[in-house]
Image (cartoon, rainbow, N blue to C red):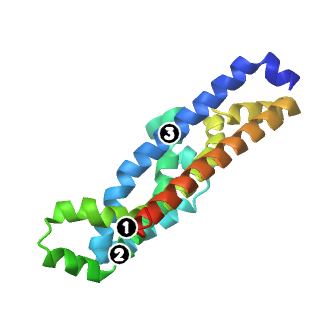
Amino acid sequence: MDYLISHYDAVLECVLEHVELTVLTLLISFIIAFPIGVLISKCKIMSGPINGIFNTIYAIPSIALFGFLIPYTGIGTGTAITAFVVYNQYMLIKSVEAGFDSISPTIHEIGKGLGYNKLYFFFSVELPLALPSIVNGLKLATIGTVTGSTLGATIGAGGLGVLIFRGLKMRHWNKVIIGTVLCTILAFASSILLQAIENRVRKRAQGEL
């Protein structure tokens, strides 16, 4: 606590950097993953190859992927965000695809019978029913990004990893403990928030709200 109080400005800077890195990564990840997930849910012939590519990339260690990207994206935040955006596709695309796959064909037939416009049907019926699965994937991606982003410090991306790795290098265990605890708190708080959102959209999809 003494270290935290006396260096609160440096710790706060690391927390804000970590949050910014996480939010930017998730935003870009979702913007990319959502249309891909919708596409392969409609065109199943593309599901195997696309999921196979991202499954393979997900198995690559972070440090190795950083090393591959650095010649193209340089040292810093850009490389970290690019790497974690690519990693997140593994979970997000599958969750989007699974969400739309879970919709009963009967619902589609009812929509056609009622003469719904495809775009209107997508946003008013399909998307609300798929949301629980999508939010669940977003929750897993958020936890993975919060914890994984600590490695971004190894390439100058900042965040709580700075405290952890500097503490390890200097054998300053206060830094290591504070960085680890704060990262855990962020992951835990994110998980609770997104679980609450998932529960709410699930109840709405089931007609309980």
The number of numbered badges drawn on the structure is 3
Query: Image quarter for residue 95?
Result: bottom left
Residue 124: % across, % down: 26, 61
Q: Element type at marker 3?
A: helix
At label 2, which amino acid type do we have? Answer: Ile
Q: Taking 32 as reference, is 152 above or below it? A: above
Query: Image quarter for residue 182?
Result: top right
Q: Taking 100 as reference, is 66 above or below it? A: above
**What's the mark number on residue 103?**
2
User: What residue sits 70% from the left and 20% below the top?
Assistant: 10
Q: Element type at marker 1?
A: helix
Callouts 2 and 1 close, C-beta under 8 Å: yes
Residues under labels 2 and 1: Cα distance?
7 Å
Farthest residue, direction front: 209
Quadrant holding the N terminus: top right
**What's the mark number on residue 129?**
1
**What's the mark number on residue 23?**
3
